[in-house]
Amino acid sequence: MFNFKKVSLGIALLSSSVIAGQATAANVERGVAVDVQEVKLPTLNGMQLDLSHLQGRTQSKASKSDVTIMGPASGISYYEVFAVGSTDKGWEYPPASQFSTTEDHGGNQLLVAVIQYGYGNPNQATMNGQQKSYNSREYLCGSMSNLHICNTGETVTGFLYYFDFSGQQSGQFNTSSNSTASPFGYWSDSIYIK
């Protein structure tokens, strides 16, 4: 005899275990980094991306009230091109006030790293008429004065997005993101890559 209740319960339990299995495999759960794997930062021309440049970049934006606490995620309060890297030149870290790279980038690979402090949805970046979504990201934790790759148990406060425009030699790079929490708004940055 066919028992509809047992079959329905079995399907419901199977579905919930599949969903739960997907949730436990996530790197971030409710804004907290879990199951953090060792991060291998991109290397170009023998130079690995150096996150120590985050400290100098974001230090001027820090304040005494800049403390990471457990609570609702905040919207974007900082969005900027952090580094430009290429096969020919390695990584360059242009200051926020600079509108172009100093180095002439080129070669097989061209990556642009963008910092986003706060939660938002990055839009497609553009360069020489091409539009691309970010191809990878790292979770950042800490306050603006102490941003770093997250450790297990830390609250995610920002993101480091990588846009891959390999094959391009030079041109205007534009990027933007929409804040998903207060303060709401549209953030953008651009740089001319030589």
Image (cartoon, rainbow, N blue to C red):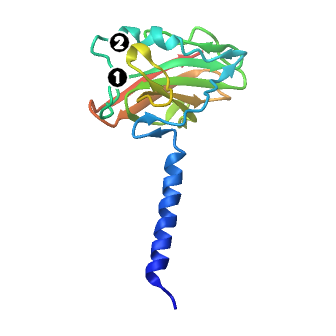
Return the residue found at the far bottom: 1
Question: Type of residue at label 1?
Answer: Thr
Judging by the rendered image, the residue that carries numbered circle 2 is 61
Q: Earlier in the sequence, mark 2 or mark 1?
A: 2
Residue 19 vs 70, above or below: the answer is below
Picture quarter with the C terminus: top right
The reply, left or right, for residue 55 in relation to residue 180 is right
Residue drawn at point x = 54 percent, y = 34 percent: 134
The reply, left or right, for residue 64 in relation to residue 5 is left
The picture places residue 120, in percent across and down from the top left corner, at: 38, 34
Question: Type of residue at label 2?
Answer: Lys
- Where, by quadrant of the figure, is residue 144 drawn? top left
Q: Nearer the viewer, residue 98 or 40?
A: 40
Query: Mark number for residue 68?
Result: 1
Q: Is residue 99 in sight in this rendering?
A: no
Q: Nearer the viewer, residue 36 or 193?
A: 36
Q: Nearer the viewer, residue 74 or 99?
A: 74
Query: Crowding at label 1, few (<14), some or many (≥20) Cα neighbours within 10 Å?
Result: some
The picture places residue 94, in percent across and down from the top left corner, at: 52, 11
Residue drawn at point x = 72 percent, y = 21 percent: 107
Q: In the rendered structure, are the residues bearing label 2 and label 1 in contact, judged by CB atoms less than 8 Å apart?
A: no
Residue drawn at point x = 34 percent, y = 31 percent: 186
